[in-house]
Image: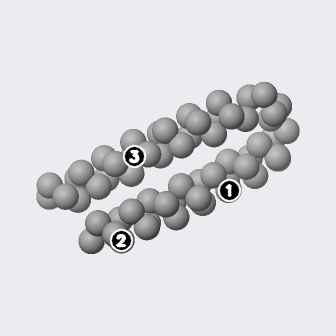
Amino acid sequence: MVFFIVLFAVFILFVINSMTDALCDRREIPSEKQPKLFRTINILMTILLTSTYVKILFT
């Protein structure tokens, strides 16, 4: 079960990063702002995935 959740989380992070990259290209976000955007989105997604894991684990 844990392996499936970790694999799913990695897949979700990859998809979200791909979509963020497309957003940066489409909106022409300056390259100096992109690392901050990626970092913020990755941290928020990691918090979301961790809280989902904890909810599944203790429910």
| Residue at position x 77%, y 43% in the image | 24
Image quadrant where one finds the C terminus: bottom left
Q: Report the amino acid beneath label 3.
A: Leu
State the CA–CA distance, disc 3 to disc 2: 16 Å
Residue toward you, 29 or 13: 13
Picture coordinates of residue 27 (x, y %)?
81, 40
User: In the shown orientation, is residue 57 left or right of residue 52?
Assistant: left
Q: Of the residues under marks 3 and 1, which one precedes in the sequence?
A: 1
Q: Nearer the viewer, mark 3 or mark 2?
A: 2
Q: Report the amino acid beneath label 1.
A: Ser
Image quadrant where one finds the N terminus: bottom left
State the CA–CA distance, disc 2 to disc 1: 21 Å
Q: Which residue is mark 2?
A: 4
Q: Of the residues under marks 2 and 1, which one precedes in the sequence?
A: 2
Residue 5, labelled with which disc? none
State the CA–CA distance, disc 3 to disc 1: 18 Å
| Residue at position x 83%, y 31% in the image | 30
Name the residue furthest front: 3
Task: Tell me whether circle 3 and circle 2 mark residues in contact (CB < 8 Å).
Answer: no
Query: SS at mark 2?
Result: helix
Q: Report the amino acid beneath label 2.
A: Phe
Q: Which residue is mark 1?
A: 18
User: In the shown orientation, is residue 15 left or right of residue 35?
Assistant: left
Q: Check disc 1: other Cα within 10 Å, few if <14, some if 14-19, many if 20+.
A: few
Picture coordinates of residue 21 (x, y %)?
73, 49
| Residue at position x 67%, y 54% in the image | 19
Residue 48, labelled with which disc? 3
